[in-house]
Image (cartoon, rainbow, N blue to C red):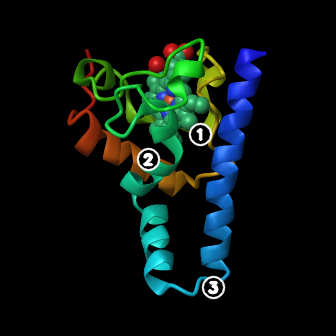
Amino acid sequence: MKKISSLLLVGALLGAGFFAAGQAVGGQQSDPTAASAWKAGNEDGGGNFLSYCMPCHGDTGKGDGMLSEDLDVKPRNLSSPKFLSSKSDKYLFKVIKDGGASVGLTENMTPFAEQLSDKEIRNIIAYLRKEICKCEFKED
Ligand code: HEC
C-alpha cells in the first residue's frame, strides 16, 4: 500500500508538470517569460532534472528529494562519482527510459518513456555527468 500511494503521488506531481507544459506549448501563457523559462527547462537537461528527478533524487542528486522518505527502496545518490562513473550512458538511458524494473531494480524508479523524448533523456544524462556527479564513465 505504501509503495502504491507514493507512486500515485509521483504520478500526480508529474501530471501537474505535464499540464503546465501543455499550456505553455498551446500558447495560452500570458507571461512570455514564464513560457520561455519552461521551454528552456524542457530542452535543457538541468531543467528536466529539476522537474522529473528532483522529487526523489533531490536537487543535488543525493537521493534526498521530498518523496524519498516514503519510498521503501531509497533513490540512489547520483552525486557519487564512484557510483555514476561505473555506469555507462547506455545503461543510464535504459534505466531512465524503461525504469528500474527493466534492469532488475525497484519500480520506485519509474520509467520516463512517456514523459521524456530520447533527446531529453540524453540531455539529462549529460547534466548528471557535468553538474551532478562531475564524472565520466570509466570502464574497469
Ligand atoms: C519516484 C521516485 C523517483 C524518480 C521521480 C526518479 N527516480 Fe531514479 N531512482 C529511484 C529509486 C528508488 C532508485 C533506486 C533503485 C534501486 O536501487 O533499486 C533510483 C535509481 C536511479 C538510478 C540508478 C540506477 C542504478 O543502477 O542503481 C539512476 C541513474 C536514476 N535513478 C536516475 C533518475 C533520473 C535521471 C530521474 C529523472 C528523469 C529519476 N531517476 C527519477 C527513484 C526515482
Task: Calculate the distance from the C-alpha at mark 2 to the C-alpha at mark 1.
Answer: 13 Å
Q: Secondary structure at mark 1?
A: helix
10 Å crowding of disc 2: few (<14), some (14-19), many (20+) = many
Q: Position of residue 82 (x, y in %)?
A: 24, 18
Residue receiving disc 2: 49
- Give above or below for 55 relative to 63: below
Residue receiving disc 1: 97
Task: Calculate the distance from the C-alpha at mark 2 to the C-alpha at mark 3.
Answer: 24 Å
Q: Earlier in the sequence, mark 3 or mark 1?
A: 3
Decide if residue 131 is in sight here: yes
Please name the amino acid that badge 1 sits on: Lys
Residue receiving disc 3: 27
- Give above or below for 28 relative to 108: below
- Give above or below for 117 relative to 71: below
Badge 2 vs badge 1, beta-carbon distance below 8 Å: no
Q: Position of residue 52 (x, y in %)?
A: 53, 45
Q: In the shown orientation, is residue 140 left or right of residue 109? A: left
Q: Position of residue 10 (x, y in %)?
A: 65, 37
Q: Is the C-beta of the residue carrying label 2 under 8 Å from the nearest atom of ligand 1?
A: yes
Q: Earlier in the sequence, mark 2 or mark 3?
A: 3
10 Å crowding of disc 1: few (<14), some (14-19), many (20+) = many
Q: Secondary structure at mark 2?
A: helix
Task: Calculate the distance from the C-alpha at mark 3 to the C-alpha at mark 1.
Answer: 28 Å
Task: Tell me, for residue 73, which label it has, or none.
Answer: none
Please name the amino acid that badge 2 sits on: Phe
Please name the amino acid that badge 3 sits on: Gly
Where's the N terminus, which quadrant? top right
Decide if residue 94 is in sight here: no
Q: In the shown orientation, is residue 91 left or right of residue 137? A: right
